[in-house]
Image (spheres, grey):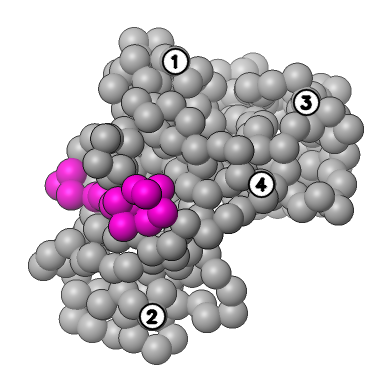
Amino acid sequence: MKIFKSFIVMAIALTAGFFASCSTEGVWDAYDTTSEPTYSFEQKASNYVLSATDTLYQVAVKVFRNNANGNVTLPLDVQFNNTIMTCDTAVVTFENGKDFAEFLINVDYDNIKVGTKYTAALAFVVDSLNYTEANASLTGNSSTSISIQLEYTWESIGKAVYTDDALTGFYGLPDFPVVEVDAEIAVGTSVIRISTPYGAQYPYNESGDYDTSKDYYIVFNCNDPEGVYIDGWCDTGLNWGYGIFSMTSYGYYMMANGYSFDQVKAAGLMGTLDEDLCITFPVKGLVVNMPDAGTAYGNKNGAFKLDLSTTTLAE
């Protein structure tokens, strides 16, 4: 592990302050208690990418508490961007003797369209009468997002050039690594994906720093060239000792938390695909995460770029 990996930068808490009505998002500060119960969603995000032979009619979202005492019902703030996903109730109920519960989301699988991403955002209702400082506190993941998508049919477009300014949100790297990546397009769309930019070719990696068992994709939705976003939380397979590095765009992050595409685009948080076939994002227009280090802005220097001019799209 190279020396750069020892200089981890403290992760910053994300806020959605560009909307006057938006509350602070990120990891809630746990109350200073010793015996009071604490609650957390199992994961910050869950992405379901389904093949043509898969089916999915229900999603179970796990919620944990630090004890197993009593029957407890907590209200949730549940937001869907679609009519495909529904819930019977907006509460999660713990049974006595169990330290976890499941919140069920119903999926109208038979009406899912190929290539469309359906999302849900869940969060604890902090100001509820059943959920106050007096009887509960938050730890870990105070919110979670779920996405469901039927897989595209992908077609190779050759090699693209990837300039990284995502890991610099965590580490003091001395430059912005440039790597060549395989690129594909989803047939009939302007959705692009690239394969494993943080694998063997990433200059600061050593053997064992990244997963070699499969490809890891970063997906860029470019259907609107002025409203480009990374489609979902994308695992990279890289692990420098703080858990698997994952990333998305701030535009997607805000849409997963209830804002519309048009709202986020109007706020200037989306990326662009320019006439030179280069994808770029605003400064702090990426969001990056390592489980043991936290969540932070990426593209802090504005250097991130995916150059597609070297692909068959330029022909």
Residue with the mark numbered 3: 84
Q: Disc 4 or disc 2, which is closer to the eye?
A: 4
Q: What type is the residue that disc 2 sits on?
A: Ala
Residue 258 showing in the rendered view: yes
User: Mark 2 vs mark 1: which is more N-terminal?
Assistant: 2
62 left or right of 270 in image: right
Work out which residue is located at the far top of the displayed protein and give it.
20
Residue 22: x and y in percent read 41, 17
Residue 40 showing in the rendered view: no
Residue 263: x and y in percent read 42, 15
Q: Disc 3 or disc 2, which is closer to the eye?
A: 2
Dividing the picture into quadrants, the one containing residue 187 is top right
Q: Main secondary structure of the magenta part?
A: loop
Q: Residue visible at 29% across and 85% down?
A: 1
User: Mark 3 vs mark 1: which is more N-terminal?
Assistant: 3
Q: Distance of mark 4 from mark 2, alpha carbons? A: 26 Å
Residue with the mark numbered 4: 152
Q: Residue visible at 58% across and 55% down?
A: 155
Residue with the mark numbered 1: 262
User: Mark 3 vs mark 2: which is more N-terminal?
Assistant: 3
Q: What type is the residue that disc 3 sits on?
A: Ile
Helix, strand or loop status at disc 2: loop
153 left or right of 190 in image: right
Q: Nearer the viewer, residue 184 or 100?
A: 184
Q: Distance of mark 4 from mark 3, alpha carbons? A: 18 Å
Q: Is residue 282 above or below residue 41?
A: above
Residue with the mark numbered 2: 200
Helix, strand or loop status at disc 4: loop
Q: What type is the residue that disc 1 sits on?
A: Asp
Helix, strand or loop status at disc 3: loop
Q: Residue visible at 18% across and 49% down?
A: 303
User: Mark 1 vs mark 4: which is more N-terminal?
Assistant: 4
